[in-house]
Image (cartoon, helix red, strand yellow):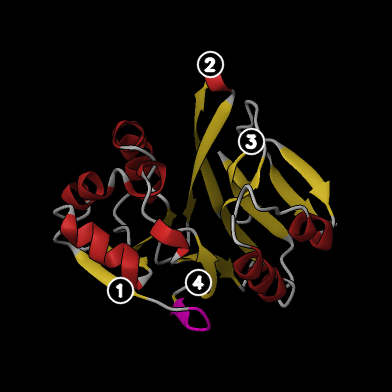
Amino acid sequence: MTIYDSLYQFTEYIAPIKLSIHQYLLAAPEPVLIHTGTADQTERIIPQLKEILGSVPLKYILVSHFESDECGGISILKNNFPDVTVVCSEICARQLAGFGYDGNILVKRAGETLEGDGFLFSFVNYPSEVHLQNGLLFFEEVRKILFSSDLMFRLGDSHGKLIESAWRDEVYSIDMSRVPNEEKLKSMKNELLKIDPEFIAVGHGPCVRVD
C-alpha cells in the first residue's frame, strides 16, 4: 500500500512479540527499495515489487545497517534484479561481501548525497553496526522523508498506520536503548536536528507525520 507520496510500505507482523517489520519502495522513475526484510519476507514481497515496477528495473536498495531485517534478502533481490545497486556504509559493505554478496555496492558516508531521477537522498551517521560503528540513516529531500530504521521504535500491528508528533519530540525520545553510548547518541541527535522531515518512515511501528 502507498503510505505517503510515491512511497509503498510492506509489512511483516510477528504476533507473539507484537513486532511489525517494514520495508519501503520509493516508486520514483528510478525506483529505490529501503531495506529488504528477512529472506522469507523478501520472497513474499518480490511478486508485489514486480507488479508495482512493471518493466522498470529496481535501481537501488538502501541498507542502514547489517541485520537480517534490513538486508537478509539482498541475494534474493539480486537474483530477481541483477543490475540493482546496494547503497550502504563502508562497514556494511564489508560485511555483505564477507557473507558472500557479490553484486553492485555503492558506499556512502554521512554528508554525502545520492541523486537520481525523482529523488535526492542525504545521509546521517547512525551508530548501529557492530561495536557501534556507523551505519546510515536516509533523508529523501524532495519529499522530506526520513527513513529512521530502528530509532523511532514502537510495538504493535502497524501496517499502514500513522501517528502525529513533533520532530524535536521524536529526536529527544531516542534513548540509550537505541544507541547505548552517550557521546554517540548526543552527536547523532545533533545531526538529526539539522534536518526537517515532514514524514518518518520507521522500521518498526506506526509511521510519523511530523506536525
Q: Amino acid at mark 3?
A: Gly
Tag 2: residue type? Answer: Pro
Q: Residue 106 bears which disc, if any?
A: 1
Label 3 neighbour load within 10 Å: few <14, some 14-19, many 20+: some
Mark 2 sits on what residue?
16
Residue corresponding to mark 3: 160
Q: Residues within 10 Å of mark 4 (few under 14, many from 20)?
A: few
Residue placed furthest toward the bottom: 112
* Quadrant housing residue 197: bottom right
The mark lying in front, picked from 1 and 2, is 2
Check residue 114 for magenta coloring.
Answer: yes
Q: CA distance from mark 4 to mark 3?
A: 23 Å
Q: What stretch of residues is rendered in magenta?
A: 110-115
Give the distance between the C-alpha atoms of the residues marked 1 and 4, in whole angstroms: 19 Å
In front: label 2 or label 3: 2
Give how far across and how far down residue 202 sits, in percent. 60, 48
Could you tell me if residue 63 is visible in this image? no
Which circle's residue, 4 or 3, is located before the other in the chain?
A: 4
Element marked by disc 1: strand
Tell whether 6 sits left or right of 60.
right
